């Protein structure tokens, strides 16, 4: 792998794409695969496959930083013993429950998905389908009030149902955050609570997926490959800080329909390009 100035700019651009799309419900993996059609990195196929997953750790670290006080199950005071935050421990146990369906499906079908479904047309179809779903669900939601307003009020049963919806995100173009948010909205969780639970859920999911990819690739990185990973993660981290703050402010006053329209438009453009323009 040769790392020149052009490759340097490509990695930064991919980090920006990851930081923006990881948290907005528009599919980070889908965008990364589509961008790769036009901006091809000078790296092996095995490294690229691992890079597109591990770069997401930068985005996850941004969540940990911004939600540190909410995610840490201990509260430290002047006393020698930390105070255990039972509600936070309970929330993390619910996250574990929500992770189970996705973990099982990923272990069973990850290789098949990578080999057969990471195609532009599959991504386009998923973008359009879930874009329509966002619009329909938000219109339907206007006629009802959420039954769960705060992330702390999510039950174990609700968490498991959200985890089942997260399984849909194994299809490229679906969006992990999009699938979990759609599921949460359908079963009566508020937008803010749905987004926050998605942030919690992302931490173990992405750390687990990254560990699997690194173990599969091995630890024999060249200096250029290691630099690319760190640069991509750092860029994704910085951009994610801004995007998460924007999203949490946005959904307090607006719904998710704009993301649905974006997904549909992008999906149509991708369909047209790969059927007519190539």
Image: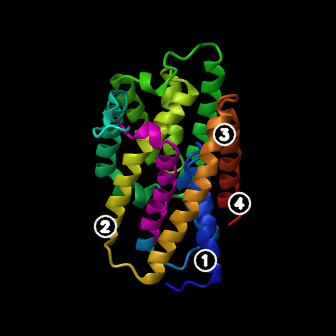
For residue 95, side relative to residue 251 (left or right): left
Q: Which residue is drawn at 32% across and 33% down?
A: 83
Task: Say which residue label 4 marks.
Answer: 276
Rounded to the nearest angstrom, the CA distance separating label 3 from label 4 is 25 Å
Q: Is mark 4 on a helix, strand or loop?
A: helix
Q: Is mark 2 on a helix, strand or loop?
A: helix
Residue 12 sits above or below residue 128 on the image = below
Can you give x and y, in whole percent of width and height, for residue 150 in the image?
Answer: 50, 24
Can you give x and y, in whole percent of width and height, for residue 211 in the image?
Answer: 33, 60
Q: Main secondary structure of the magenta part?
A: helix
Between discs 3 and 2, the one toward the N terminus: 2
The quadrant of the image that shows the C terminus is bottom right
The one nearer the camera, 3 or 83, is 83
Mark 1 and mark 3 in contact (Cβ < 8 Å)? no
Between discs 1 and 4, the one toward the N terminus: 1
Rounded to the nearest angstrom, the CA distance separating label 3 from label 2 is 34 Å
Mark 1 and mark 2 in contact (Cβ < 8 Å)? no
Task: Say which residue label 1 marks.
Answer: 8
Task: Say which residue label 2 marks.
Answer: 216
Task: Say which residue label 3 marks.
Answer: 259
Magenta-drawn segment:
48-77
Residue depth check, mark 3 versus mark 4: number of the one nearer the observer: 3
The one nearer the camera, 117 or 31, is 31
For residue 136, side relative to residue 181 (left or right): right
Between discs 3 and 1, the one toward the N terminus: 1
Local crowd at mark 2 within 10 Å, few (<14), some, or many (≥20)? few
Can you give x and y, in whole percent of width and height, for residue 66 in the image?
Answer: 53, 45
Residue depth check, mark 2 versus mark 4: number of the one nearer the observer: 2
Residue 58 part of the magenta-drawn span: yes
């Amino acid at each position: 792998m040769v790392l020149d100035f052009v490759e340097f700019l490509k990695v930064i651009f991919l980090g920006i794409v990851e930081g923006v799309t990881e948290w907005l419900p528009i599919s980070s993996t889908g965008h990364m695969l589509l961008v790769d059609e036009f901006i091809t990195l000078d790296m092996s196929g095995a490294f690229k496959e691992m890079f597109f997953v591990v770069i997401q750790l930068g985005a996850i670290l941004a969540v940990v930083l911004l939600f540190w006080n909410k995610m840490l199950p201990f509260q430290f005071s002047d006393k020698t013993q930390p105070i255990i935050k039972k509600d936070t421990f309970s929330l993390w146990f619910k996250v574990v429950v929500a992770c189970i369906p996705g973990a099982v499906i990923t272990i069973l079908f990850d290789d098949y998905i990578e080999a057969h479904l990471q195609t532009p047309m599959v991504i386009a179809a998923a973008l359009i389908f879930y874009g329509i779903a966002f619009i329909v669900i938000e219109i339907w939601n206007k006629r009802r009030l959420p039954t769960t307003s705060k992330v702390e009020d999510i039950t174990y049963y609700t968490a498991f149902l959200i985890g089942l919806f997260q399984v849909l995100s194994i299809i490229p173009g679906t969006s992990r955050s999009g699938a979990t948010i759609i599921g949460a909205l359908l079963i009566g969780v508020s937008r803010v609570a749905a987004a926050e639970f998605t942030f919690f859920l992302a931490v173990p999911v992405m750390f687990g997926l990254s560990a699997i990819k690194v173990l599969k690739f091995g630890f024999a990185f060249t200096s250029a490959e290691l630099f690319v990973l760190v640069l991509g993660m750092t860029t994704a981290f910085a951009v994610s800080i801004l995007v998460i703050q924007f999203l949490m402010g946005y959904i307090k006053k607006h719904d998710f329909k704009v993301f649905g329209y974006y997904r549909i438009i992008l999906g149509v453009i991708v369909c047209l390009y790969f059927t007519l323009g190539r």
